Every structure is written in C-alpha cells, then in structure tokens.
Amino acid sequence: MASKPPPAKHYPVSPTYRVLDGHDIYRSSNLIVALVVVESQYGRDMRLYRWINRNGQWKVDLCRMGVKRWDWAALAARAAEFAEKYGLKGDHQAGPQQPDDD
C-alpha cells in the first residue's frame, strides 16, 4: 500500500533541529527535496535535504548539508546559463526525469 506524503511544510529533520521554514523543491509520496531553515543549540542554518520514503519511514537520502554560505545569485545565473545553452525545459520541478513526449 502506498503511503501518503507528509502534510505540506512537514520536514522529517533530526529531533536536534527545530524547523523555522522550508521550501519544497520537489515532493511526492516517495521523495522530498527541500531547502529548510533549521535552528539548533548551535544557531540557525539553511540546509538542503533529500528524503526518501522507505517502508513508510522518511530517511535522509543523498543530501543533508548546510548551504547558507552558497552564492545563490551565482548559482541561479549558472543554472539559467545551462538551461539556455542545453535547451533544458524550465518546468520548475526537480526529481526523477520523465521522458519527453516529443
């Protein structure tokens, strides 16, 4: 039986963190990729997460890193450059690639 995705704005972070805010980059019943602002005893951090649903339990998959020091303007500019250069579709969703119908 397929499990339902967690309610919007629910992020299964470690109990040592308190979620202050978050943005889903991609969310399905089996995968969540999100940018999440957390607070712990060491202060606030912005982290990139990727969780996968394994047997009804959300587990950190590939990402669990602080990203507050990243140059977001430069990253956005490079992403736009690659999208233009390689003719990538801008459907604003990440996740598993779907075959083109073309």
Image: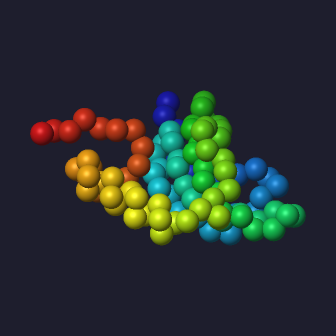
Residue at the spot x=60%, y=39% of the render? Answer: 62
Expressed as whole percent of the image width and height from the top left, the position of residue 89 reads 25, 52
**Which residue is at the far right?**
41
* Residue 58 visible, this orientation: no
Q: How many marks?
A: 0
Front-most of residues 44 and 11: 44
Q: Which residue sits at x=57%, y=59%?
A: 35
Q: Is residue 52 visible?
A: yes
What is the quadrant of residue 53 in the picture?
top right
- As displayed, is residue 62 above or below residue 73? above
How is the model colour-coded? rainbow
Give the x, y percent position of residue 102: 12, 39
Residue drawn at x 26%, y 47% as measured from the top left:
86
Left or right relative to 6: residue 27 = left
- Side (left or right) of 76 relative to 3: left
Q: Nearer the viewer, residue 1 or 8?
A: 8
Q: Estimate the x, y position of residue 6 in percent, counting from the top left.
A: 56, 51
The spot of residue 27 in percent (x, y) is 47, 50
Q: Residue at x 47, y 61 (%)?
A: 75
Between residues 27 and 86, which one lies in front from this camera angle? 86
- The residue at the far left in this view is 102
**Res 77 quadrant in image:** bottom left
